[in-house]
Amino acid sequence: MFKHFLRLQWKSFFRSSSLGKGLALKLLMIFFGIYMLVTLIGLGAGLYFLLEKIDPGVDPMVKLSQVLIYWLLFEFFVRYFMQKLPILDVKPLLLLPIKKSTITHYVLGRSIFSFYNVLALFVFIPFGFVLMANGYPVLLVLFWFLSILSLVLMVNFVNFIINKSDKALFGLIIIMGMLRVFEYFDWLPISQYAGEVFYTLYENPALAMFPFLFAVIGYCVNYRFLRNRIFLDVSLKKKTKEAVSTNMIWTKRFGSIAPFLQLDLKLIWRNKRTKMQVFLSLAMVLYGLIFYTMEDFGPQSPMLVFVGIFMTGIFLMNFGQFIPAWDSAYYSMMMSQNIPLRKYLESKAGLISVSVVGMFLLSVPYVYFGWEALAINFSSALYNLGVNIPIILFFGSMNKKRIDLTRSALGNMQGTGAAQLLVGIPLFGAPMLIYSVLTFLVSFEAAMIVLSILGIAGFVLRKPLLDKITNVYRKKKYGMIAGFKEKET
């Protein structure tokens, strides 16, 4: 029966009418996937020697055990946004004499071989071979690998239960942030305690049964959860929600752009994908802790500008890169009305500007790491306001792919095209290049001043810049309308 299900999935993929659409993007994603796997193999093969170099005299297995807790938490975080349960279209099968238990086992069995589980194999298998080549007992390495694989599968199954819960996401972000803070200020040696637990799994092979047992329990819980939800009447039942409306009277103070601003705020709040962009943006304010706590990244490193641009402009990138595709469902209606396109773009710029200012204010506590951190975040925020906002709006004129906001936000790549892949070059590349050249030739202070001046100049010239961008949108109006009308099947 499983073989029959796989054959159905294979035919469904190749007979899909949308197979030819976005073929270049699919091939590009395959290329990046292969590149990632090769990189992970290299990481696994060189991880032993890297850990040995980082902390000479310490067993690399001990050092790896101390960071495994962060590996698992990072897997949780990535899977929450990216991984989807490989659901077979079970509705037609519910009318056939096929056991529901068989369908459920097939769905969960396929998830075991998901891409995210394979990633761990490409890291830990080469690492295991290096361990055995360096004299580690084969039996201990094999059982340790089994325990790590079981933990990865446990993460896989737990994700299927919590991935629809915003509370679980907030809880995970808080846990990751608290662990990092406790570790940095030496309040609680999380890595040391967790490392002792994971290293014990290596020293005592019999203990590998506990991670395996956790994975089995996760499978059983998911089986019961799915088995009770694949009835035909459950799938046909409509969800009912109480409608909550607000007039957002306070937006009227923004004048002629107020109606567009109201539409954007309602769109963000009422749809999962846009709402997730807001939550993800707020979570990324902790991104600087990764770099500012590392001594390898000094004031001369362009990566700090990357962090500043990224932290203060995360909403600019997540939300701005899909303008005006967010409104693709009714974009043709808007363009047929007497609606000033200039005001439409001005409202988008205003909303993004507020997000940049807000993210900068949230990043002010990084002054704890020195005034250089505050200066980088401030100049990056100014650069985002003056330069990157016009850039993101200009690249929006190249968006012709429809976004269906009724679809799930998890793993949803709708609207992604060449424009989204190219826009990162000017957003990050230009400020990093400017910063690198000026810090090398002049000084850190000069680089900060130039980035700030560029941002202020762009903000002063926003009116003529928006006028030119508006003309570009007008020229491409009909092409964008035609693209937004195409629906994926």
Image: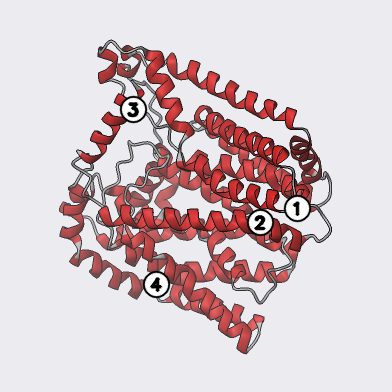
The residue indicated by pointer 4 is: 462
Residue picked out by circle 1 = 60
Of mark 4 and mark 2, the one earlier in the sequence is 2
Q: Specify the amino acid type for callout 3.
A: Leu
User: What is the x, y in percent for residue 257?
Assistant: 35, 56
Residue 385 is left or right of residue 467, and the answer is right
The reply to whether callout 2 and callout 3 are in contact (CB within 8 Å) is no
Q: Quadrant of the N terminus?
A: top left
The residue that label 3 is drawn on is 88
- Mark toward the start of the polypeptide (2 vs 3): 2
Horizontal arrangement in the rendering, residue 200 relative to residue 72 (left or right)? right
Location of mark 2 (residue):
47
Q: Residue at x 52, y 51 (%)?
A: 281
Can residue 455 be seen here? no
State which quarter of the image contains the C terminus: top left
Q: Marks 3 and 1, Cα distance to the nearest angstrom?
A: 42 Å
Label at residue 427: none
Residue found 66% across the figure and 34% down from its top: 147
Identified at 15% across, 59% down, the residue is 478
- Between circles 4 and 2, the one closer to the viewer is 2
Label 4 packing within 10 angstroms: few (<14), some (14-19), many (20+): some
Look at the numbered disc 3 and give the secondary structure of its residue. Answer: loop
